[in-house]
Image (cartoon, helix red, strand yellow):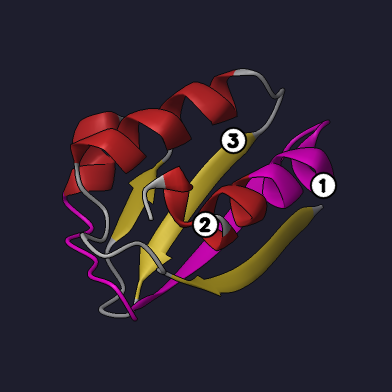
Amino acid sequence: MTVKQTVEIRNKLGMHARPAMKLFELVQSFDAEVLLRNEAGTEAEASSVIALLMLDSAQGGHIEIEANGPQETEALKAVIELFEAGFDED
């Protein structure tokens, strides 16, 4: 089963190198595939920092997070918390 939820980007600079790396490192600790989708429909696997940077998502934008796998619920919750914390940048 797949779980998904949409979040708002809260950090000032949006999805740039530091948040992409934090997100990449976070999802590595879960047995789940995490996919992000921006408002334009561009998708990025969270296991690829380069793909995450291609989302080109700014503060105030929305990202749909989709997780699939044995730890999908835990992975989704952790990714949502990271977004809600503004990637600890503010």
Q: Amino acid at mark 2?
A: Phe
Q: Is residue 44 above or below residue 56?
A: above
Q: Give the residue furthest to the front.
A: 90
Q: Secondary structure at mark 2?
A: helix
Q: Is residue 70 above or below residue 78?
A: above
* First along the sequence among labels 3 and 2: 3
Which residue occupies the foreground of this view, 33 or 79?
A: 79
Residue 50: where, in percent of width, then height? 19, 34
* First along the sequence among labels 1 and 3: 3
Residue 28: where, in percent of width, then height? 56, 20
Q: Is residue 61 above or below residue 25?
A: below
The residue lying at 29 percent from left, 73 percent from top is: 59
The residue lying at 42 percent from left, 31 percent from top is: 22
Q: Secondary structure at mark 1?
A: helix
Q: Left or right: where does residue 64 sit relative to residue 55? A: right
Q: Is residue 55 magenta?
A: yes
Residue under label 3: 33
Q: Nearer the viewer, mark 3 or mark 2?
A: 2
Disc sitting over residue 83 in the figure? 2
Disc 2 and disc 1: Cα gap in Å?
Answer: 16 Å
Q: Left or right: where does residue 63 sit relative to residue 68? A: left
Which residue occupies the foreground of this view, 14 or 89?
A: 89
Q: Is residue 67 magenta?
A: yes
Mark 1, other Cα within 10 Å: few <14 / some 14–19 / many ≥20: some
Disc 1 and disc 3: Cα gap in Å?
Answer: 11 Å
